[in-house]
Image: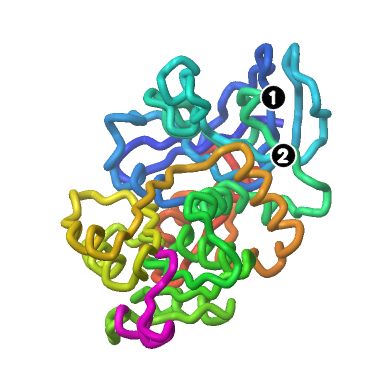
Amino acid sequence: MPNIAAYYKGDHRFELRDAPVLPPAADEVQIEVAWCGICGTDLHVFHGAMDQRVGSNRIIGHEMSGTVAALGAGVSGLAIGDKVVVRPLKPCGHCPACAAGHSHICHNLKFLGLDTDGAMQRYWSVPAYAVHKLPDEIPLDLAALVEPLAVACHDIERARLAPGETVLVIGGGPIGMLIAIAAAKRGARVLLSEINLSRLTLAASFGIGAFDASKTDVAREVMAATGGKGADVVFEVSGVQAGVDLMTEAVSTRGRVVMVAIHAKKPVIDLFRFFWREIEMLGARVYEPQDYEAAIDLLVRHGSEIGRVITERRPLSEIQIAFESFEANGTSMKTLLNCQEGTAQ
């Protein structure tokens, strides 16, 4: 079967064509990709914001699922036909972060699907260390949520979230929504701030207390909901200044703030409030292997519910339409591409 791949060509354009299918090298796994999700980073590529990094002939994509097609020499623990997902990080192995056991924040970190070709193709070969085996009961379309769900699991671990605590998630996009869902499954009381009506509606359908930040004073609502205490943990996932302002206003005394979003501009932060209330700030970036296993476990237990964040499925041959629709449609949450359905142009 030919390897149909979607190449990013720059200027908001993809080109479908055959890509070579090479046998996996030693310590590599060749995967027959089933589904690949479109994420915020992929949209940044589509907008041209990452052209200097990815170039104009790159196969992108990393939120994927598939089955093992072939094994390179030296690979153990996997068999042809196994359902798998990929943790798309390529650390250097020798920087201070790697030496300290924190390779996910390697000083020279490379991303599979950005710095190398990615999953928006039929066959993809990756390092064996990056492959996580899936239980048979997880459908492959839901399995494409493991990567973003692992981000949420990592964020929650960084927050040291305990059952019974109150959480405020600022920003209800895919990552914010998955943080809110995962926090609720941890036993937290979850509130969410967002301005998009469809996202607010989806959050409410999960039993999350959703506040429309365009119409209400969210900090006041959080204080009212917590008897004046504030949220024990606030996740800043909006990436805008208003979200940064809200996080310091809505967090409790000695509460924790977790910075998840990437801010295009350096935000202004009220450091006096951190001093005055002994607030703790934590950074949270991507994931570690155990976060992937936690995400897989969540999908085993709650997959049908979490799967409601998938709002659109399209064949890879419609990648151009998928990106344009995802960008224009304010109701989309997560779009998946079927990488087994594609035709070269």
Q: Is residue 222 magenta?
A: yes
Which residue is label 1 attached to?
29
Image check: 228 left or right of 164? left
Q: Amino acid at mark 2?
A: Val
Q: Secondary structure at mark 2?
A: strand
Asked if 108 appears above or below 326 in the picture, the reply is: above
Residue 135 in magenta?
no
**Residue 269 vs residue 22: left or right?**
left
CB of mark 2 within 8 Å of CB of mark 1?
Answer: yes
Relative to 124, does residue 321 appear above or below in the rendering? below
The stretch of residues the image draws in magenta is 219-234
Q: Quadrant of residue 207?
A: bottom right
Q: Which residue is mark 2?
A: 84
Q: Residues within 10 Å of mark 2 (few under 14, many from 20)?
A: many
SS class of the residue under badge 1?
strand
Classify mark 1: residues with Cα within 10 Å, few (<14), some (14-19) or many (20+).
many
Identify which residue is drawn at 59% across, 41% down.
Answer: 343
